[in-house]
Amino acid sequence: MIYARELPGGGFVAIETTDATQDAAFRGRISVERRADPARRGGHTPPVVAEVSGPTEAAVFHELYPIAADNVAIARAILRWQAAKNRAGGAAPRREQ
């Protein structure tokens, strides 16, 4: 995890990255935990609302940070995730930004 912040109503937003392999770029994603009560989070994986890849961890961060730092952008990303989940009939497909 390279970035995290609390949401105003509880929960948190996080940016996570994975190291580049020899054949692949760095990958990053934004996950949003909307549950304010930590006891309700057990067994729950926060939805991933954005994913990108880039040549460096910094490039991935700079692409995802404007979304993660903006409450309105997070709300829009959650709405897109929910719509995709509803269209897919369950689990939301991961989406490239």
Image (cartoon, grey):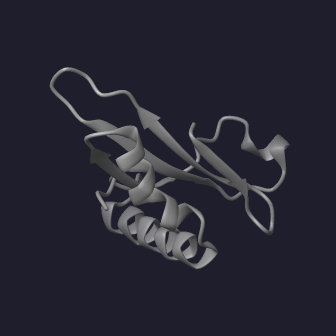
Side of 73 where 71 appears, left or right: right
Extreme top residue here?
22
Residue at (32, 39) in percent of width and height: 56
Measured as percent of width and height from the top left, residue 3 is found at 60, 46
Residue at (55, 61) in percent of width and height: 68
Q: Nearer the viewer, residue 40 or 57?
A: 57
Measured as percent of width and height from the top left, residue 4 is found at 66, 48
Side of 62 where 70 appears, left or right: right
Residue 34 vertical position relative to residue 25 in the rendered view, above or below = below
The quadrant the N terminus occupies is top right
Measured as percent of width and height from the top left, residue 94 is found at 34, 52
Residue at (32, 57) in percent of width and height: 95
Residue at (25, 41) in percent of width and height: 55
Q: Quadrant of residue 11?
A: bottom right
Residue 56 vertical position relative to residue 75 in the rendered view, above or below = above
The quadrant the C terminus occupies is bottom left
Residue 23 vertical position relative to residue 3 in the rendered view, above or below = above
Side of 54 where 16 appears, left or right: right
Q: Nearer the viewer, residue 86 or 15?
A: 15
Side of 10 where 68 appears, left or right: left
Q: Nearer the viewer, residue 58 or 79?
A: 58
Labels in figure, total: 0
Q: Nearer the viewer, residue 95 or 45?
A: 95
Measured as percent of width and height from the top left, residue 43 is found at 66, 35
Q: Quadrant of residue 21?
A: top left
